Image: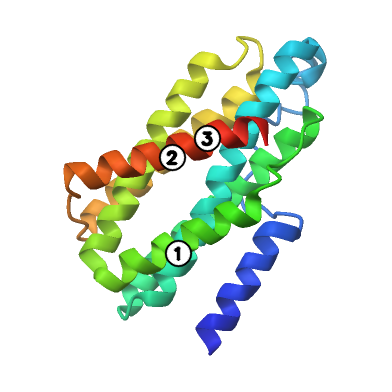
Amino acid sequence: MDRLLTAADIALRTLFAPPRTARPYPARPAPDDATQAKESGADLLDARQKRLSGALMRVNHVGEVCAQALYTAQAATTRDPALRRHFEESAREESDHLAWTRQRLDELGSRPSLLNPLWYAGAFALGLVAGRIGDPVSLGFVAETERQVAAHLDSHLGRLPAHDRASRAVVQQMKADEERHADSAVAAGGVGLPGPVRALMHAAGKVMTTTAHYL
């Protein structure tokens, strides 16, 4: 019952509460650097560039909503206390990403996905299934998910407007964190997933990112 209540609390806070961050916002300029402060803002972007950056950051925000759901479900299903702490620590780092992407959306005058509750529910269900199969598979699922997310973020660096320095700073830090999470999952005992499973995950991610780009 305690785990169920904790999971419900995290879901409500992820979807409806203002996100909080424990680390500094990557796009924040140094206080004494007025030029950088100007160049990191959304004021240098035209309307089309703002729409593009906003759409890409909305997709990234959806990914962080899903990450909260995934790690919460896996922490709830594992019986290994050390592994539960591992998932909970990863979720805390992902909550930084959730706050950063939401802040950047606000700066760009954009909005989160209208389908966030649906994305959260789907990711939570996948986390429960992976957790029930066993810890090695659950960790392998995390590793593969984080690798695919890192590759996706890398593609965004090629699509963001060249002078959208704020969005780029956020995406670069997120990419570094996701790669580290993947390595940590493998080091903790994650196993490689079969090719068809990886392909199915990629296809599902494509559907999600394409839809979230607009909705």
Position of residue 52 relative to residue 180, above or below, is above
The residue drawn where x is 22% and y is 54% is 187
- The type of residue carrying mark 3 is Thr
- The type of residue carrying mark 2 is Gly
Q: Which residue is mark 1?
A: 125
Q: Quadrant of residue 114?
A: top right
Q: Which residue is mark 2?
A: 205
- Residue 80 visible somewhere in the drawing: yes
- The type of residue carrying mark 1 is Ala
The residue drawn where x is 25% and y is 54% is 140
**Along the line of sight, which residue is nearer the eye, 202 or 164?**
202
- Tell me where residue 128 appears, x and y as whole percent: 40, 69
Real-space CA distance between mark 1 and mark 3, rounded to the nearest whole angstrom: 18 Å
Q: Quadrant of residue 55?
A: top right
Q: Crowdedness of circle 3 by 10 Å Cα count: few (<14), some, many (20+)? A: many
Which numbered disc covers residue 34?
Answer: none
Real-space CA distance between mark 2 and mark 3, rounded to the nearest whole angstrom: 6 Å
Q: How many marks?
A: 3
Which numbered disc covers residue 209?
Answer: 3
**Along the line of sight, which residue is nearer the eye, 89 or 142?**
142
Q: Crowdedness of circle 2 by 10 Å Cα count: few (<14), some, many (20+)? A: some
Position of residue 168 relative to residue 14, above or below, is above
Q: Is residue 14 left or right of residue 193?
A: right
Q: Is residue 47 left or right of residue 92?
A: right
User: Is label 2 in contact with label 3 (beta carbons under 8 Å)?
Assistant: yes
